Amino acid sequence: MNFTKENIAFLPRQFVDKHMLITGQTGSGKTCTARSLIYQLQKENETVIILDPTGEYTKLPNMVVYTLGENTFIDPGSLEVKQLLRVLDIETSTLLTSKVEQAIESLKIQENIAGRKEVYLKLGLPIADYQDKVEKLKPWMNRYPFALLTKQSLEEFVVPKKDDTADYTLVGQVYDREKINQCWDDFMVLDRRIRGQCFLEMFGAKNQTGRSKYDIDYILSLFLEKRSMKRSLVLDLSRLKKYGNSQKYLMSLILKKILVK
């Protein structure tokens, strides 16, 4: 069925004021029904936000399209560590999860306090100096260099020496290689995800030359706080098609953001 103004079936208002599930066999008209609903809501100047996992809604008329990883990104600092790991589709040990959480804090210190986008070296670092920087870190200082997360996580495995030369005024003197080896498989998965172009672009760590990229929270706020003027927002998540679990979880996070706003 072709999508034209002539064959749009308008639904009574009570059907679009509630949750709705459109289901059916292939070719039964699910997409056409959804498009009809979108057109109806656009005519009434209602806000329409489409989370598009395949990119099929990006070519519809009166759509403002933002493609995740291309012209919009997710600030990794807006996610809790468990949320971040789920978006990356990584199941890690409790130990590595805690080290990743520490690594994020260290990278936030580097970018927001020290003004550096580099690994925060912990060997020989006085505990007092580290705690002083932690206290200076404010809740709104969320930005950090995502691409360095694996390297920084390794740095969090520093410990005092196990002999009489142990210095407990330092964060660490040697790397705990035994525990690093225990987590090594998870480290490799984490590193592959973080180095992958899809996730680097999705989290704003890598941009296309000449293209502006906007925080997805900012884009959502614009559409939720202002009348849409017969235009709809499409968030194209098709770049995550090969990471099905990541895509599904990310869609649930975005829906929560929309409901909260």
Image (cartoon, grey):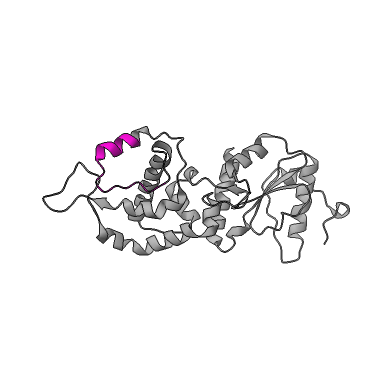
Residue 12 visible to the viewer: no
Q: Nearer the viewer, residue 6 or 212?
A: 212
Extreme front residue here?
Answer: 209
x then y, percent, for residue 77: 47, 44
The residue lying at 30 percent from left, 39 percent from top is 130
* Residue 2, placed above or below residue 100: below
Residue 51 visible to the viewer: yes
Determine the image quadrant of residue 168.
top left
> For the N terminus, which image quadrant?
bottom right
* Residue 114, placed above or below residue 246: above
Q: Nearer the viewer, residue 239 or 227?
A: 239
Extreme left residue here?
Answer: 164
x then y, percent, for residue 247: 56, 57
- Segment tinted magenta in the rendering: 118-134
Determine the image quadrant of residue 151.
bottom left
Q: Nearer the viewer, residue 106 or 9?
A: 106
Extreme bottom residue here?
Answer: 26
* Residue 181, placed above or below residue 116: below
x then y, percent, for residue 127: 25, 40
Label count reads 0
The residue lying at 41 percent from left, 52 percent from top is 149
The residue lying at 38 percent from left, 40 percent from top is 109
> For the C terminus, which image quadrant?
top right
Q: Is residue 104 magenta?
A: no
The residue lying at 77 percent from left, 61 percent from top is 29
x then y, percent, for residue 50: 67, 49
Q: Is residue 99 left or right of residue 255?
A: left
Q: Is residue 182 left or right of residue 241?
A: left
